[in-house]
Amino acid sequence: MNFDLSDEQQLIKSTAREFTDKEVVPVAGPNSANHHFDLELVQKIADQGYLGAIVPREYGGAGLDYITYALICEEIGRGCSGMRTVVSVQTSLVCSTILKWGTEEQKQKYLPLLCSGEWLGCFGLTEPGAGSGASDQKTRAVQQDDGSWRINGAKMWISLANHAKLALIFAQTEPELKHKGLACFIVETDQPGFQPTPIDGKMGLWASDTAEIALDDVIAAPDSMLGQVGDGFKVAMSALDSGRYSVAAGCVGLCQAALDESIRYAQERTQFDRPIAGFQLVQAMIADMVVRTEAARMLVYRAGAVKDAGRPSTLETSIAKYNASEAAVWCANTAIQVHGGAGYSSDHPVERFFRDARVTTIYEGTSQIQQLIIGRAVTGIDALKPMVLERAPA
Ligand code: CAA
């Protein structure tokens, strides 16, 4: 077992680190405070090749492996979770899904536009009534005589939807078939029936774009489906296998940022005639942050290694996402504790880290959904399916 990064991975990590320190960190606080979705910064991230990190070069991507992708997500996540969310949605939920399920024509048409940042994409799975129970889609797609699909319904909590030129829309084609009637459509958003509305009042991720979408007679072209009718739920789950991984890696970056700020503050801040870093109880908090950050990083790398080996990675991904997102909330919260009153104000970034961390145990599958996936894998019992207990004869 080799824990060392390759020379190329080291180089990409240090480049992403420098990029984040120069371009992301200085604007992260102001963008958050101003609720500003910074499209110029998104373009700079695209210009670095990060929006198509795991897409092969022939489709305009950077052709990197999954571990290297995690290094990028970690660095961007260290600077700004809102921008890391852009990377997660564009690269994992949209690009990797088109890459896995798309026809050659679909890949050639859309991936270069997405990798270059010319187009943003969004992932329209969640609905007002379908969150954790994602298969219960009420959005309906009905095929027209000309082969196109007419889609009606509503989507909720969709990152990037106000700016996306392309949306992956999941819809039910035959309700009686339940999840086997679901399909995923590549929808071009430049049509009157596609109506995003920004969602205000979020607790965090103020630098990220979030919308609900009304789908009112939206038309998807005859050749716009990813996979076949009935593949929709698998398309969604495979997308989330990549998305959850990128969230986990971003959470490692959040943990690291909380830790870095805590070390810096504890060294500078004096009380009782010594830096507070000189108190054992403060060191205990910092030591626990180090341990949780390192453990989260290792579980992300392990999931990445499984993906790079081409093996099924749902279990490893859920373990990594569950652990890293809970660690990010814990580390951000503890960083506020290290900062004391100062940490409770926007004068220090740890307050933003905490608000931004909070959603990571919710989006792309709650911690409880990750627990169910893990529990199902190790017990062999699906807690979401009816169970008939066999009784021994009396
Ligand atoms: N890859 C491919 N196929 C998969 C899969 C995977 N990882 N996981 C399951 N499947 C397949 C199964 O094999 C099964 O196929 P068959 O019908 O052929 O047997 C089918 O999908 C149904 O699988 P399940 O029985 O596991 O489905 P379920 O209804 O029990 O649901 C669940 C399982 C894990 C709870 C799932 O519903 C889930 O992950 N829910 C959470 C949804 C979620 O994460 N939403 C986040 C939205 S994205 C987001 O946050 C947007 C944003 O903008 C940030």
Image: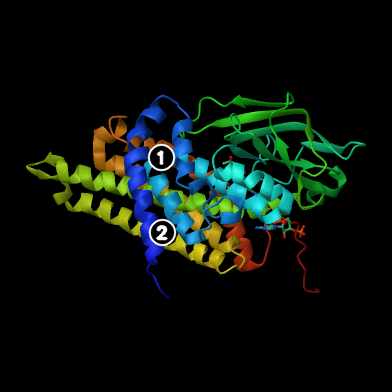
The answer to whether residue 324 is above or below residue 269 is below
x and y percentages locating residue 54 in the rendered image: 54, 55
Mark 1 near ligand 1 (CB under 8 Å)? no
Q: Which amino acid does label 2 sit on?
A: Arg
Q: Residue 98 or 368: which is nearer the viewer?
A: 98
The answer to whether residue 287 is above or below residue 76 is below
Dot 1 falls on a residue whose secondary structure is loop
Q: Which residue is drawn at 55% across and 51% down?
A: 61
Instruction: Give left or right: position of 149 versus 343.
Output: right
Q: In which quarter of the image is the C terminus?
A: bottom right
Q: Residue 287 or 218: which is nearer the viewer?
A: 218
Disc 1: which residue: 80
Q: Residue at x 80, y 38 (%)?
A: 221
Disc 2: which residue: 297
Q: Is residue 192 visible?
A: yes
Q: Residue at x 36, y 58 (%)?
A: 11
Q: Can residue 82 be seen in this view?
A: no
- Disc number lying in front (2 or 1): 1
The answer to whether residue 177 is above or below residue 138 is below
User: Looking at the image, which residue sits at the far left?
Assistant: 273
x and y percentages locating residue 201 in the rendered image: 51, 25
Which label's residue is closer to the chain start, 2 or 1? 1
> Which of the numbered marks, if any, corresponds to residue 203?
none
Q: Answer few, some or many: residues within 10 Å of disc 2's Cα (few below 14, many 20 plus, some between 14 and 19).
A: many
Dot 2 falls on a residue whose secondary structure is helix
Q: What residue type is labelled 1?
A: Cys
Q: Quadrant of the N terminus?
A: bottom left
User: Looking at the image, which residue sits at the far bottom?
Assistant: 1
x and y percentages locating residue 30 in the rendered image: 36, 28
x and y percentages locating residue 306 in the rendered image: 54, 67
Instruction: Give left or right: position of 394 versus 119.
Output: right
Instruction: Give left or right: position of 34 versus 153.
Output: left
